[in-house]
Amino acid sequence: MSSQPLLPNARNDLNPTPRRSLILTTILIPILLIGGIIFVSIKGDGIPKDDLGLAKYYLKGSPVIDGHIDLPEFARAFYGNNISAFDLNKPTAGHVDIPRIREGSLGAFFWSIFVECRDDNGKDFLNPTFQVRDTLEQIDVSYNLIEKYSDTFAFASTSDEVEIAIKEGKVASMFGLEGGHMLGNSLAVLRTFHKLGVRYMTLTHSCNNAFADSAGIFEGVEERWGGLSKFGRSLVAEMNRLGVIVDLSHVSDKTALQALAITRAPVMLSHSAARHFNNMTRNVPDNILAKIGRGKHQVDGVVMVNFFPSFASAHPEEVDVKYIADEVEYIVEKTGKHHVGIGSDYDGIESTPKGLEDVSKYPYLFAELIKRGWTEHELSLLAGGNFLRVFRGVEDVSRKLKKDGWKPSLEIYEKRKDLKPIEGGF
């Protein structure tokens, strides 16, 4: 098998091919593939026979794209963002380091840009905080780590850049913003974060904000807007225009359903568990899963499965590789195999499933699915192909909206008074 990624729907236009060469390629590749199949069937060597060996073999060609890893938060919480105080080339106290990344065939991930919700923002979220400052620091520490370990990581802000990085043997590094509370109630801040590389944003974290209501974490929170606020609807539209993926993890059910009703672009749930297994508001319910798809009245998207045992089950001690495989297959039952991915939440969770203790263990989940009959192609969709399709879809919508004349939204949060124009001029 080729060492190049087998990610579905791979673009062939990264290096334009002359028409004559394209015709020859179209003729020759099937012949070579048939020849290779015959050769392998005769020789019978090279392809592992055991499930774990086969999973590792497949992942070398289609590495994992994880929707949510809290490495920047790990650097902040344990080292005060001092990247000289720890070495990712050696084992860390968390779930992520470079040797384990390589062992687990992690090919790309979203560096989660996160700062805590605060309970002193005020009813209208207007009390000054340091959240925008702290968010910028988390983007900064992410860039610093990518630069320090540039032999391993490569920053990526487009789907093409993700594929290029993987093909070059690097770990494609994207930024996801975990919560609209980090925007300081400002669409201008969203645009600035986009320029700094943010490519998805979770509409809320565990708190309501000026844009939308949250699901809370282990308990729900009292709704403020009944889903999206008026300003939140403008936020979704501006994210569509910019090409920032709308992430519906953490949000209330009303927020999710309303966002799905108005988005023009595909969506993601970057790190979610199914409510079917654990009836908590943080988890995604069946009626929202039913909205994810490519059929009538559905929105294309990817649900990236969270590994945190306390989300996965009311009895966390029972959660192991097989349990997470059950979650994957349940989401597939509701959405199809084109709409599921991996969103581990590594470095952001206090415990892990048995057998999925860190990033080196992804192959064990894939081995369990092989045992259940999953094909190489289906596993490549789960590993990252589904996410890349969604990412490309968001990019396509952004290009179309800009071509259609959409300009940056100048809407201001209605509760703000500091930008009220001076009456009468000078």
Image: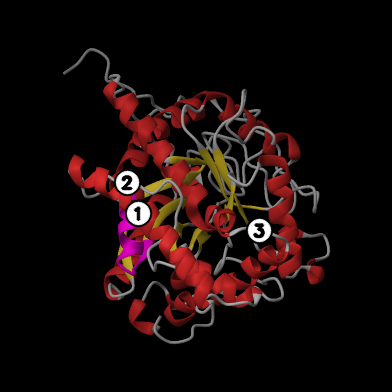
Q: Residues within 10 Å of mark 2 (few under 14, many from 20)?
A: few
Whether residue 150 sits left or right of residue 113 in the image: it is: left
Give the numbered dot on residue 29: 1
Residue count near mark 3 (Cα–Cα under 10 Å), binned few <14, some 14–19, many ≥20: some
Quarter containing the N terminus:
bottom left
Looking at the image, which is closer to me, 303 or 368? 368
**Residue that appears at 25% across and 44% down:** 22
Closer to the camera, 305 or 74? 305
Placement of the C terminus among the 4 image quadrants: top left
Q: Main secondary structure of the magenta part?
A: helix
Name the front one of labels 2 and 3.
2
Residue 161 lies in the magenta-colored region: yes
- Residue 334 spot, x, y in % from top left: 72, 41
Residue 255 in view: yes
Residue holding disc 2 = 26
Q: Is residue 116 above or below residue 71?
A: above
Question: Extreme top residue here?
Answer: 424
Disc 3 on helix, strand or loop?
loop
Q: Amino acid at mark 3?
A: Trp
Q: Considering depth in this image, is 405 or 45 the residue closer to the camera? A: 45
Location of residue 55 (image quadrant): bottom right
Q: Are marks 1 and 2 in contact (CB under 8 Å)?
A: yes
Residue type (three-letter) at the residue carrying disc 1: Ile
- First to last magenta residue range: 160-172
Distance, label 2 to label 3, CA atoms, is 28 Å
| Residue at image mark 3 | 374
**Residue in the picture at 33% in, 73% down:** 152
Of the numbered discs 2 and 3, the one sitting upstream in the chain is 2
Which mark lies nearer to you, 1 or 3? 1
**As drawn, is 222 to the left or to the right of 150?**
right
Which residue is pictured at 81% across the width and 69% down the height? 318
Residue 69 spot, x, y in % from top left: 51, 63
